[in-house]
Image (cartoon, rainbow, N blue to C red):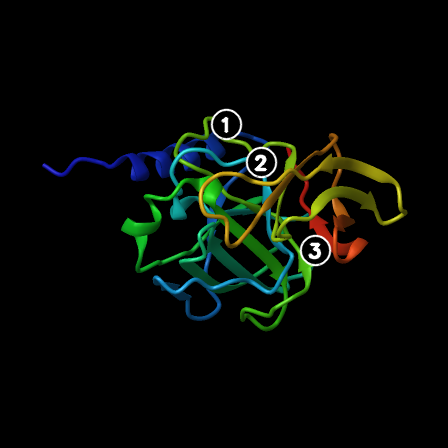
Amino acid sequence: MRHATKTSLGLVALIGACLVNPAFGQVSRLALEGPLDESLSERVRVSGFRLVGLHLGSASGRFLHEQLSIVVPSAVATEPLCLRLASRDGRYRALAPYRLPDADPLIRLLDFPTRHATDISRLPAGDMAARLVISSGCNDLTDGVLVPLWLRGMADPDPLPASRLTVMLNLGEARASAVLKSEAGDRLATAACPQSMQGSSVTFTHICQLELAVGVEGRASLEITTIALTRGRSTTAYAVLLPRLP
């Protein structure tokens, strides 16, 4: 008899929890709009972006590619999306094109037919950085409005995404802080971005966690301020599309 694995049980638990939760309604999959481009090698690939990951909540436990999800922003037209997923050590990297769906159902599990499921399932979920942007192209240089991804791990007990925005940055030795602002310029959340000291950090070096108030959704601006010895102080603003959280 074939026994269910912890990974498959985790996926069943997620879908079951969401299906019975009225805040989510139905759960469905979001299909790829093109081929999944991925690689796993000893050759380290470094992103050219400072902001390499934008997630809902804080993932814990082992990485589960079956649970990559998007909580769909409300009142949006269908738009092309590009997902860039990379491991902390830079050895794994993937590019996947999708299309932003209508807001119903609220949550979509991303179709992610990886060839490296065994290898990446050994990685901690917190070692993966996902950058999802609205863009018609999908390559290593793709940029655009950021949409936070719900990246869960095997040890995450909550079937709902936390009202927290996790930002992963590649800044070297600089100091950093983050401010989330509404379209009108009002401050929604602020956070320091301490250096991540775990293991070999190639893809990201700093992590910020911004707590979101109830009702925060729609278009916003994420401002990252860095202070470096050689470059001084600088601020970069990123356009973000926040979903409606239950």
* Residue plotted at (80% across, 54% down): 232
Q: Do the residues labelled 2 and 1 touch (CB within 8 Å)?
A: yes
**112 relative to 194 in the view: left or right:** left
Q: Are marks 1 and 3 in contact (CB under 8 Å)?
A: no
Please identify, in this view, whether the residue under mark 1 or under mark 3 is nearer the observer: 1
**Residues at marks 2 and 3, CA–CA distance in whole angstroms:** 22 Å
Residue at mark 3: 76
Quarter of the image with the N terminus is top left
Q: Residue 57 carries which label?
A: 2
Give neighbour class at mark 2: few <14, some 14-19, many 20+ (Cα, 10 Å): many
Residue at mark 1: 158
Please identify, in this view, whether the residue under mark 2 or under mark 3 is nearer the observer: 2
**16 relative to 59 in the view: left or right:** left
Q: Earlier in the sequence, mark 2 or mark 3?
A: 2
Amino acid type of disc 1? Asp
Residue found at the very far front of the displayed protein: 229
Amino acid type of disc 2? Gly
For the residue pair 10 and 42, the one nearer the viewer reads as 42
* Residue plotted at (55% across, 35% down): 58
